[in-house]
Image (cartoon, rainbow, N blue to C red):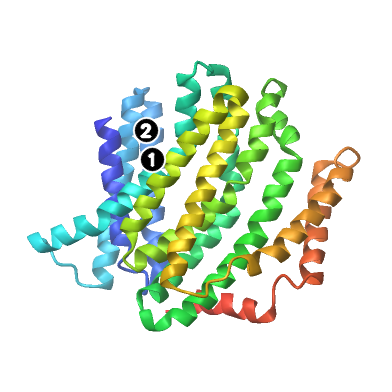
Amino acid sequence: ASVAVAAQAIMVLRQSLAAVPIAHEVMIYEMWQIVAGRLALVALFLGAVAARLSYLHLFTATAAAGLVSLVMAWIVAARLTPLRWGLRASEMAYLARESAPVALYNFLGQMPMYVNVFLLQWLGRTEAASFFQAPQRLLGPVMILPMSLVLALSPAIARISVDPARRDELRQHYATALRWMFLLALPVCVAASVYAPELTSLVFGVEFLPSSVVFGVLCWGILPFSLNALVNTVLTAMGKQGVVAWAHVAALVVSAGAGLALALPYGHDGAGVAFLIGVTVLYLINHYVLAVHVPGLPLWSRLWRPALASGLLAAALIPLKSHVAIPWVALLGLGIYGGLVVVLKAVTVQELRGLARVFRKK
């Protein structure tokens, strides 16, 4: 446990240094510190395996690789900007005051998924807990596409959010981000729901087919989960991280309450619905808070076209499900969805240009 805590502390320090070169030589910084860390990790792991060391030594190798990455991050950051050793007490107090809510809501953000696992275990539904946990392993790869957009947009949108004089820019770029996240996430949710039994059977085997329903439900949590990451970034840049933390507390209470009501009669399926309710409530609270401070933010106007295109995609995929192999369906589905996006004008030329400006903004 102490080694794991040390590894997490090193990771936090490295990520703090990562803020230094955001507006400078980002690619050089990333290349050196990530490559150094990965090479060290591979070398240390191979050495530990070759020496037939214990699992503790493998965890220690991970922490040591993180330390190598931290040292490289410090070296590169020091070359980009002068670094000053030591902090005054007032600076430490400021960092603690500003960072504590962020740390709290990052921790609470993971809880709606796991609190329902604890509830199922507490209710004695061990088998249901296993069926609930299995789809979580598939959610990581499925979330790569929308979350990659969030990570790409976050630095630029955070810089815009800090300046009250740039609220019009924030509205424009937030609307563009919403549209693209809906466009990317909704078809993924639709396809994963339609083919949930096939994906579950392929990855876990036919004995886990009972978890296919909860997998289809959990996939719809990708959208509010990704949107929350975006809104959290904006509100934190505006200095509202305390409000975000309270929103996470409220969402956790809602998720736990829904879990108590649904997990006993419906098992893992009810726990999945409780998770979806929790992350949706969290996004609605965050969006409301952001809309209070930045009036005129869009939501439904950016949602209906991608939602209609995704609904029509589902109507096309369901009849093909039993007649066409999954690889061909994936290609055909991309063509169908792309055509629907063009026909419905779900993306305009202005929004494409706005997205490009976000990535170019310094």
Residues 318 and 139: in front is 318
> Residue 259, percent across and down?
51, 32
Residues marked 1 and 2 touching at CB (< 8 Å)? yes
> Residue 103, percent across and down?
31, 49
At numbered mark 2, what does the secondary structure look like: helix, strand or loop?
helix
Of the 4 image quadrants, the one containing the C terminus is: bottom left
Side of 75 where 224 appears, left or right: right
Above or below, comparing residue 6 to residue 129 in the picture = below
Instruction: Identify which amino acid the numbered label 2 is placed on.
Output: Gly
Quadrant housing residue 345: bottom right
> Residue 167, percent across and down?
44, 79
Q: Which mark is residue 43?
A: 1
Residues 212 and 41: in front is 212
Of the 4 image quadrants, the one containing the N terminus is: top left
Q: Residue at x 33, y 44 (%)?
A: 65
Instruction: Identify which amino acid the numbered label 1 is placed on.
Output: Ala
Side of 72 where 83 appears, left or right: left
Quadrant housing residue 293: bottom left
Q: Residue at x 89, y 44 (%)?
A: 319
Q: Which mark is residue 157?
A: none
